[in-house]
Image: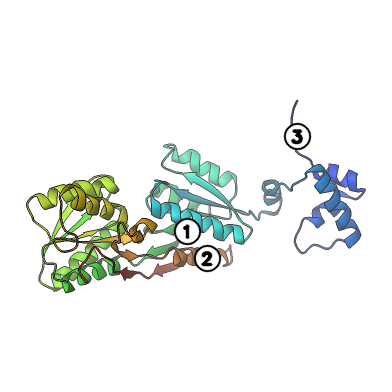
Amino acid sequence: MKRNFVTSAQVADRAGVSRSAVSRTFTPGAYVSPEVREKVLLAAEEMGYRINRLAKSLLTSESSLVAILASRLSEPFIATQIDALSAMLADRELQTLLLNSGARRDIAAMMNLVLEYRVKAVIILSGAPSEKLVEQCLKSRQRTILINRVQESGNVDIIQTDDRTGGRLAACHMIERGYRRLAVVRGASDTPSQRRRAQGFVEAAAEHGLTVRHWLGGDGGYESGRDAARELRTSNAVDGVFCTTDRIALGFLNTCRFDLGLDVPAEIGIVGFDDIEEAGWPSHALTTIRQPVSAIVSAVASILETDPSDISGHAHVVPVELIARQTTRP
């Protein structure tokens, strides 16, 4: 048996009213008499009717869908952003269309999907491909919000964490606590965010007359930190390490403690970046640079509230702060 959705015409017949009365009943701000509203709502409840928001958006050109494009969805900081962004959108009666750009190689097909849904905006998170995808959004005059990504041209909204300042905070914190043989560890993907963080760290160290060793490898996750710890500590080459994500830092930390038998923070200090939930667990107590997700979400919300015809692009810089815990000396 074929299953069909209940239509507004069927609700109108059941309630004994016009289809326009049904439409007005489910349109915020539209006038309908209390008697008619009661009839429509009762009929809709009995029949299990729900409005077709996709069809409505096609008629009004006002979509309630916001697309979020991301990759590596299992990464804690990416997952936290998606959770917070989708909650913010729901509070504003907007719906989330989540697209895993890491699961599809056909970026053109993904872009067509976004444009066919005529979404209100596209939010592209750090690490999601690709430059061509962003260019297609802009060519189609699609409102596009980039989070921790860089776009050289085009009128695009950009939200960027103050990564370089975060790197500087990490270096100054370590130097003040007596660490002198410094290293920075980042993944081989070498994203713009990680490069900026490393650059800030190196700059601040140089101002104190210190050079910094660089370790680059792996996918930028836990394993990168594990491999870096085994390599850098084999020769006792470093006593202070800045990892450009918390996931890398946790791999480095646990390898130092449990595989290499090192005293953290007495023998080696470790600072991460992001302040994911696991960083604050007592078992880790990781010193890190916090980039507040709430500030990122607030910036997205403010952009969505601006005139949709304004395609001039907006820029927001999200401040960071150092959270001192137990992986660096007090």
Q: Determine the residue located farthest toward the right in the rendered image.
A: 16
Secondary structure type for disc 3? loop
The residue closer to the viewer here, 190 or 252, is 252
Amino acid type of the residue that numbered disc 1 sits on in the rendered structure = Ile
C-alpha gap between disc 1 and disc 2: 8 Å
Residue 100, image x, y percentages: 46, 43
Crowdedness near tag 2: few (<14), some (14–19) or many (≥20) residues, C-alpha within 10 Å: many
Label 1, label 3: how far apart the Cα atoms are: 37 Å
Tag nearer the camera, 1 or 3: 3
Quadrant of res 90:
bottom right
Residue 316 higher or lower than 101, as above or below: below
- Seen in the picture, residue 167 relative to 226 is either above or below; the reply is below
Ranked by sequence position, the earlier of labels 1 and 3 is 3
* Residue that label 1 marks: 145
Quadrant including the C terminus: bottom left
Q: Residue at x 17, y 51 (%)?
A: 229
Indicate the amino acid at tag 3: Asn
Front one among 108 and 196: 196
Q: Residue 235: x and y, percent? A: 6, 51
Q: Which residue is mark 2?
A: 303
- Quarter of the figure that contains the N terminus: top right
Of 108 and 153, nearer the camera is 108
The circle drawn on residue 4 is 3
Q: Quadrant of residue 153?
A: bottom left
The mark found on residue 320 in the picture is none
Identified by mark 2, the residue type is: Ile
